[in-house]
Amino acid sequence: MHRDVMFVSAFEDPNKRSSEVHRRKPNPVDFMSIAARPLAGLVVSLALMLATAGGGIVPATAAETECPPGDGWVDCQAQKGDLMAVYVKGREAYEAARTSGDFSEALAISRQLAAKGDKNGERLLKMVYLQLGWGAHRDYVQAYVWLSEGIAGGADYLVTWRKTLAQKMTPEQIAEAKKLVGG
């Protein structure tokens, strides 16, 4: 047997008459989830206590966790190995390269991330390779070499992009690039 319970929303108009307030029967599941919350919190607290006591989780010191707020925060996090911060730096280098025509830094960062299996890094690497294939890098010979290294590393999809780049190159540039690649 359920009693009627009045539920008042925090967003309801306080000037409404009480007869306008919605009435509904309580759901027993609501009461169970409310009762389970403190128990779940207790279990998590206990697990953290045991992990810390066994040496599994070691709290970091303030010097280890603190990065200065502001512009240097991403650099600090990236130096500490935070892959998302490294990706942000790579994305910034990519955006700058689209204007400057120098994809060296963006390529180096994206290769570093991709080597660690980071999905964002793998996507960024493909974006850089695409720009190289389109001829966006100011040095076509270097771009040809980088695309060839990617192909040698197993990225067969780069063959088409390298051919597209080669169409923009002079015969002398292609010969120099092939010499640098070793073939």
Image (cartoon, rainbow, N blue to C red):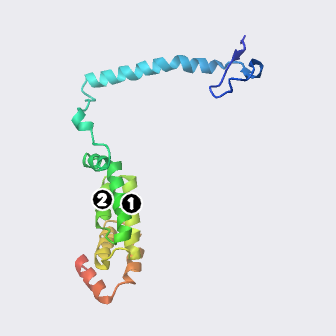
Quadrant of the rendered image containing residue 21: top right
Q: Earlier in the sequence, mark 2 or mark 1?
A: 2
Counting from the top left corner in percent of width and height, residue 128 is at 37, 66
- In the image, is 6 to the left or to the right of 98? right
Counting from the top left corner in percent of width and height, residue 96 is at 35, 65
Where 91 falls versus 148 (above or below)?
Answer: above
How crowded is the residue under tag 1: few (<14 C-alpha within 10 Å), some, or many (20+)? many
Quarter of the image where the N terminus is located: top right
Residue most extreme to the bottom: 171
Taking depth in this image into account, of 78 and 126 the one nearest to the observer is: 78
Quote the CA–CA distance across marks 2 and 1.
9 Å
> Disc 1 marks which amino acid?
Leu
Counting from the top left corner in percent of width and height, residue 163 is at 39, 79
| Residue 156 in view of the camera | no
Taking depth in this image into account, of 161 and 143 the one nearest to the observer is: 143
Quarter of the image where the C terminus is located: bottom left
Residue most extreme to the front: 15
Where 80 falls versus 144 (above or below)?
Answer: above
Counting from the top left corner in percent of width and height, residue 76 is at 26, 47
Question: What residue sits right under mark 2 in the picture?
Answer: 109
- In the image, is 6 to the left or to the right of 137? right
Question: What residue sits right under mark 1 in the picture?
Answer: 124
Element assignment for label 2: helix
Q: Measuring 38% from the left and 69% from the top, which residue is drawn there?
A: 98
How crowded is the residue under tag 2: few (<14 C-alpha within 10 Å), some, or many (20+)? many
Q: Measuring 29% from the left and 46% from the top, which residue is drawn there?
A: 77
